Amino acid sequence: MNKEQLVESARKMKNRAYVPYSKFPVGAALLLKDGTVINGVNVENVSFGATNCAERTAIFTAIANGYKKGDFQAIAVSGDTMDFLPPCSICRQVLAEFCLPDMPVYLTNEKKDILEITLRELLPYAFTDLEM
Ligand code: THU
């Protein structure tokens, strides 16, 4: 699976997003090292803070399916935005928990341009399990 296909997978997911409050659908596609793709969408709640972003939905689904830290190859995120849609800060921290700093993150926009960056670029100086 190439990055265009992964981005397309994220894009297609958006119609499954549950976004009655923000009307801001987001789709994510997570590529595992074994070639599996696990998708996620944002799932909102009337108690807004209970909302789960698309990226976290994908990561948590992968963990629930038995995948482990280090099994992740890339993630693509898609929204209907003019600018590239980056993961929120909570999702960056969750990505840092399970994915290596060099992992590619593919951001896209409504024009289908793709910006490829690494998790390290997205979250420099990430808080991890530092030694004491
Ligand atoms: N959202 C995501 O799903 N991923 C992001 O990277 C940014 C924000 C969702 C949360 C909420 O449902 C909506 O987008 C508006 O913030």
Image: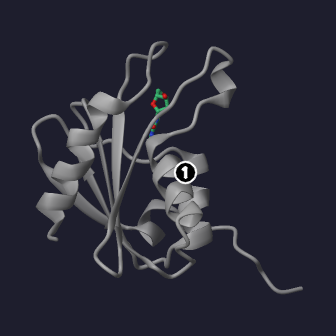
> Residue at coordinates 57% horizontally, 71% vertically from top-left?
98
Q: Is residue 71 left or right of residue 36?
A: right
Quadrant of residue 81 in the image? top left
Q: Amino acid at mark 1?
A: Cys
> Residue at coordinates 27% horizontally, 29% vertically from top-left?
15
The answer, for residue 125, to whether it is visible in the render is no
Mark 1, ligand 1, within 8 Å: the answer is: yes
> From the viewer's perspective, is residue 68 above or below residue 123?
below
> From the viewer's perspective, is residue 4 above or below residue 25?
below
Residue of label 1: 91
> Residue at coordinates 77% horizontally, 80% vertically from top-left?
130
- Relative to the observer, which residue lies in front, 121 or 53? 53
> Residue at coordinates 60% horizontally, 59% vertically from top-left?
94
What x and y, as percent, mark residue 50? 67, 29
What x and y, as percent, mark residue 23? 38, 16
* Residue that sits furthest to the front in the current view: 65
Image quarter of the N terminus: bottom left
The answer, for residue 40, to whether it is visible in the render is yes
- Relative to the observer, which residue lies in front, 106 or 19? 19
Tell me the colour scheme of the image: one colour
What x and y, as percent, mark residue 20? 45, 13
Quadrant of residue 80 in the image? top left
